[in-house]
Amino acid sequence: MPTLSLIIPCYNPSKNWEKELVQHAKGFAAFIDQEFKLILVNDASSTGIDKASIQFIKDNLTDFQYISYDKNRGKGYALRTGVATLNEGLVMYTDIDFPYEYASMKAIWMSLREGNDVAVGTRNDVYYENTPKKRTFISKLLRFVLRRIFRLPITDTQCGLKGFNQKGKKIFLQTRIERFLFDMEFIALASRDKEIKMKPVAVSLRRNIQFSKMNAKILLTESINLFRIYWLTHFR
């Protein structure tokens, strides 16, 4: 059975994050009856992470790697940094609060074990029932653009649960976007490679998940990145 590594990007985590991380890591390992390596990438947090919190994780998880650097670069950069350290096995990534159900995470893992190179979590309409209206509008607008302009086979590019094997890893490391739209760039690149088997996998959020806020600066940056991705994936 191929090894599994789970990469978690981290920036200014909330109180007691390390205890919840250990709880979920152990819970997921028990759910799939499989040990895995957890890689935490600290994207230059200014608060929430200290030596004690990292030591707590090391004391409670058998296979843990911690990566940190001094300048905040964004989620895409953080994940590429973690992925680049792996030379074998299957790779998954999600957010630090483990927002998706263990069954959904297992479904991504099983999709890769079945031979798919890239497994993409996709959310159904139930997801939007508990999502802030602003986020819902932005998400649906983006999916419209991806369907009509980018012609992508998978339009839910921003689901924070994905996985890939070593073939998929090579595509992932070709991405250049440093912040949120790296997911979209990844799927766009993978969809252009005829030798990559990419499969959407239906996933569900856990209850009472708190959504992060998207400020105007982030929206402006990602709007620019949208055009940048079109250029990178169609003309490079």
Image (tube, rainbow, N blue to C red):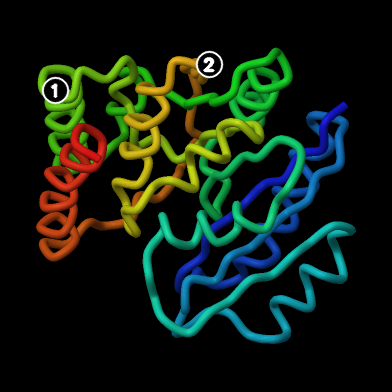
Position of the C terminus, as image quadrant, is top left
On screen, residue 72 above or below 166: below
Front residue of this view, candidates 205 and 120: 120
Residue 152 position within the rendered picture, expressed as x and y whole percent measured from the top left: 27, 20
- Report crowding for label 2: few under 14, some 14 to 19, many 20 or more residues within 10 A (C-alpha): some
Q: Residue 197 carries which label?
A: 2
Left or right: where does residue 55 sit relative to residue 186?
A: right
Q: State whether residue 201 appears in this view.
A: no
Q: In which quarter of the image is residue 76?
A: bottom left
Residue 228 position within the rendered picture, expressed as x and y whole percent measured from the top left: 17, 47
Residue farthest to the front, as pictured: 236
Left or right: where does residue 146 sit relative to residue 1?
A: left
- Residue at image position (62%, 51%) is 7
Element at label 2: loop
Q: In which quarter of the image is residue 139?
A: top left
- Residue at image position (80%, 44%) is 36
- Residue at image position (55%, 71%) is 42
**Disc 2 residue type (three-letter):** Lys
- Residue at image position (42%, 22%) is 193
Position of the N terminus, as image quadrant, is top right
On screen, residue 139 above or below 219: above
Counting every numbered tag in the picture gives 2
Q: Which of marks 2 and 1 is nearer the N terminus?
A: 1
Q: Mark 1 points at which residue?
A: 144
**Disc 1 residue type (three-letter):** Phe
Left or right: where does residue 155 sit relative to residue 123?
A: left
Q: Quadrant of residue 4?
A: top right
